[in-house]
């Protein structure tokens, strides 16, 4: 899809097709009553695949809608809007689920309505980019037919830009740590700290809300200190947050909320600035193709962190050891990113170097 978008210059129709496929699959989860688990599995696969394609195309617009000096701010505001909207949706769903009886719904029906509402929300806000964005034909070279051969061609082309590949490797490592912390924090809270569902749900909401502030604050830091330094600083903060999490006392929700606050403050900014930093390393005309590799780094290798988390727990029998093992992703990611000469990487990609990077 990335190759097709670059070759035809028609990102917007492909973005709409991917987004509405995913939105329809998510809305279709309303029908998951009884024992329709196979339907649920199919809808989940379709929705996640479509969301990956839609996000790849959405990300690839960044170099087209923001000049180099403004990308950190634009990307940060984009993530902030996303987390703010996610918070609103989560609050609405929590109200509906918690008070389902007063709405005349069973618990099962309330869950299905919440799932469907996410799909409807997705479809509604897809109208914004479809109405406002414009496709532009770029000066990129034509691509071969999409598919496995095109993926191989993309990887071969990226070998001409080894510094871009070096950044992707660093991103793959530390982003895997980020995604694992997000997915396993609730397991740590329930299994190791003995916290209830209400505490865990409140912590998720706290992460969503503070990710808005974190994304905007780190965008301001990047304007002064550069995106690379700011991302490196966020990896130090992630390491410190996990180290603090290791010592959290069991049965103390207040300290778990402090941990959630720390995660929220670095989460949005880490994601936003990684995206804007990568946008400078992409050759003009190959935005979607290269952001497809970025999306694969985000999704395709996201099993490494959970694997380490699970194996560490199996060997130690302790979720504290499992959570602290994830520090390795941030330490290694820090070292790999620190070694990337970003200015030279931007020049090698044929792009102008912003004043602060």
Image (cartoon, rainbow, N blue to C red):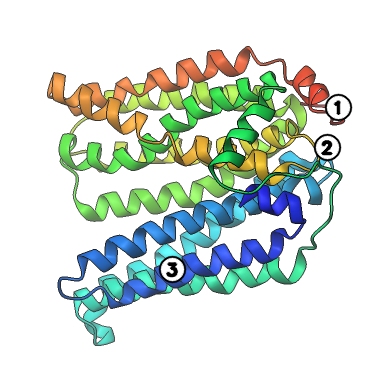
Q: Secondary structure at mark 1?
A: loop
**Picture coordinates of residue 279 (x, y %)?**
72, 37
* Image quadrant assignment for residue 109: bottom left
* Image quadrant assignment for residue 30: bottom left
Q: Secondary structure at mark 2?
A: helix
Q: Measured along the vertical axis of the image, is residue 315 above or below residue 273?
A: above
> Residue 118 — which label?
3
Residue at the spot 55% in from the left edge and 63% down from the top edge:
18
174 vs 51, nearest the viewer: 51
**Picture coordinates of residue 272 (x, y %)?**
62, 41
**Picture coordinates of residue 164 (x, y %)?**
67, 25
Residue at the spot 63% in from the left edge and 41% down from the top edge:
291
Residue at the spot 31% in from the left edge and 22% down from the top edge:
324
> Residue 86 — which label?
none
* Image quadrant assignment for residue 116: bottom left
Disc nearest the viewer among 1 and 3 = 3
Q: Which residue is mark 1?
A: 355
Residue contact between numbered discs 2 and 3, judged by CB atoms under 8 Å: no
Q: Is residue 125 left or right of residue 254?
A: right
Residue at the spot 48% in from the left edge and 69% down from the top edge:
23
Q: CA distance from mark 1 to mark 3?
A: 40 Å
Residue contact between numbered discs 2 and 1, judged by CB atoms under 8 Å: yes
Q: Where does the C terminus fall, quadrant-wise? A: top right
Q: CA distance from mark 2 to mark 3?
A: 34 Å
Q: Which residue is mark 2?
A: 69
């Amino acid at each position: 899809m990335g190759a097709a978008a670059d070759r035809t210059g028609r990102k917007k129709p492909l973005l709409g097709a991917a987004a509405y496929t995913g939105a329809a699959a998510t809305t279709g989860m309303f029908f998951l009553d009884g024992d329709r688990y196979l339907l649920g599995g199919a809808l989940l696969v379709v929705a996640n695949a479509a969301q990956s394609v839609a996000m790849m195309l959405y990300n690839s617009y960044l170099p087209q809608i923001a000049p180099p000096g403004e990308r950190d701010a634009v990307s940060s505001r984009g993530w902030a809007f996303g987390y703010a909207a996610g918070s609103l949706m989560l609050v609405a769903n929590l109200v509906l689920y918690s008070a389902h009886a007063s709405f005349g719904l069973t618990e099962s029906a309330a869950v299905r309505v919440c799932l469907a509402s996410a799909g409807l929300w997705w479809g509604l806000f897809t109208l914004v980019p479809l109405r406002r964005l414009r496709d532009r034909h770029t000066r990129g070279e034509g691509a071969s037919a999409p598919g496995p051969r095109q993926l191989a061609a993309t990887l071969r082309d990226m070998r001409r830009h080894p510094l871009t590949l070096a950044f992707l490797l660093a991103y793959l490592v530390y982003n895997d740590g980020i995604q694992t912390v997000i997915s396993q924090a609730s397991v740590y809270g329930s299994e190791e700290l003995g916290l209830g569902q209400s505490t865990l749900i409140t912590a998720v909401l706290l992460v969503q809300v503070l990710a808005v502030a974190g994304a905007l604050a780190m965008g301001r830091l990047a304007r002064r200190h550069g995106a690379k330094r700011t991302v490196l600083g966020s990896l130090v903060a992630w390491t410190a947050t996990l180290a603090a999490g290791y010592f959290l006392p069991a049965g103390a929700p207040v300290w778990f909320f402090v941990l959630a606050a720390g995660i929220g403050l670095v989460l949005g900014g880490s994601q936003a600035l990684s995206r804007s930093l990568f946008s400078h390393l992409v050759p003009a005309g190959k935005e979607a193709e290269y952001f497809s590799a970025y999306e694969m780094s985000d999704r395709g290798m996201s099993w490494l962190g959970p694997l380490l988390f699970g194996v560490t727990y199996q060997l130690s029998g302790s979720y504290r050891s499992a959570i602290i093992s994830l520090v390795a992703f941030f330490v290694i990611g820090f070292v790999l990113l620190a070694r990337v000469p970003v200015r030279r990487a931007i020049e090698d990609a044929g792009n102008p170097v912003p004043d602060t990077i």
